[in-house]
Image (tube, rainbow, N blue to C red):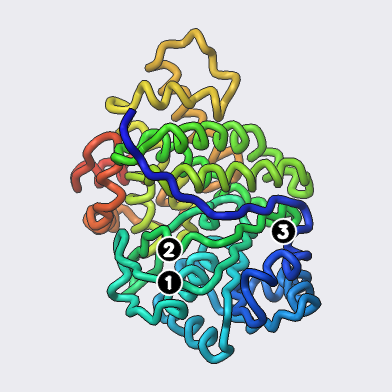
Amino acid sequence: MKPFVFSTTAQIVFRAGASSEIGGLVRRKLGERVLFVTDPGLRKLGLCDPALSSLAAAGIEATVFDKVEADPSLATVQSATDAAKAGGATGVIGFGGGSSLDVAKLVALLCGSGEDIDGAWGVGNAKGPRLPLVLVPTTAGTGSEMTPVSIITVGGDEKRGVSSPIILPDIAVLDPDLMLALPAHITAATGIDAMVHAIEAYTSRSANNNPLSKMLARQALQLLGANIEKAVFDGKNREARGAMLLGSMLAGQAFANSPVAAVHALAYPIGGTFHIPHGLSNALVLPHVLRFNAPAAVAAYAEIAADAFPDLAPEQSSQERCAAFIDRLAALSASLGLQPRLRDVGISEEHLSGMARDAMKQTRLLINNPRDVNEADALSIYKAAW
């Protein structure tokens, strides 16, 4: 068996209502002053209030930074870091979707180490140490609470990442109750995102693809496939919400150690240039990338097909199961109400060539794809998705 390294979050708390008891959970780890990183929407909805009350009751002074936007910018990271330093933060809490969690990771790093962000970009370049860090996801999709990665938009539309086990949190607090009021379209997009994480982790060409990641990816697909429609169409279903949150977490653990590939690489220009939410960006290209990959990944896709869709006939050939798996994923996205085509989100055909060029910049992702992708291939995939 080939060697591998598996890194993950040190402690996981999964419990309905856990976020409203967060003060007692994190007091010993974070100290007396924290920066609480979130977004304006969650703050306005009052979703942060029980957690902030719990922190106050535990004697923890929280400075709230609620200016995180989708696809957060480097300026946002710098502003949040300044707020943490001004408040004398002894720890950081990220509360929200992947954007808030990614910002919190870098704030903890930059405040704890004093290092220059320009030296931390890339894989394994962050030096550390970081401030103690707790992450509380409010969507079941990114799995950011389990990943050693933070993705930030720099210089306009360009995305850069910091990838290092140093920015894995000390504690992940998973509370299904935070998702009971999540809108259906966000539930759908983030749920598909989590499924993409599991699929790409399972089939990754990374040298670190390993048995643990494969096992977690399959378990994630079983939970996500069985519950995504329930969560979208019956948002108050706590069991379905919990299953989606756990599935997202497991997929996060899987791809944190067996990295994602071309679906994400081709999704990034869609999100970065046109500001389409990340989960929807993935959904728009997912079936078309998988069809491109199929000649090199037919056996792997056939293996996981019934994890997501248990009714797929086991007597089918690998090629038939693979094709059915891809078709069902496309149909699932449409049935959940997600736009099926790039043109449906306002992307014109004239933009496809530039998107293909931009996708080629994602070398850290493309190298993991089961099949080599060049610029002409990327353009063909975008044309199929248009």
Residue closest to the eye, 197 or 145: 145
The residue that label 1 is drawn on is 129
Residue occupying the point 72% across, 41% down? 240
Q: Up-down: is 38 above or below 337?
A: below
Q: Is residue 73 left or right of residue 37?
A: left
Query: Of label 2 and label 1, which has the lower sequence position?
Result: 1
Counting from the top left corner in percent of width and height, residue 54 is at: 78, 72
Q: Residue 241, can we see it?
A: yes
Which label lies toward us, 3 or 2? Answer: 2
Counting from the top left corner in percent of width and height, residue 329 is at: 50, 34
Which amino acid, mark 2?
Ile
Q: Considering the numbered disc 3 on the image, is that residue within a helix, a strand or a loop?
A: helix
The residue that label 2 is drawn on is 166
Q: Is residue 129 left or right of residue 97?
A: left
Residue closest to the eye, 122 or 293: 122
As measured in the structure, the alpha-carbon distance from the residue carrying label 3 to the one carrying label 2 is: 27 Å
The residue that label 3 is drawn on is 178
Task: State yes or no: discs 2 and 1 in contact (Cβ < 8 Å).
Answer: yes
Residue closest to the eye, 55 or 277: 55
Which amino acid, mark 1?
Pro
Q: Quadrant of residue 90?
A: bottom right
Q: Residue 45, can we see it?
A: no
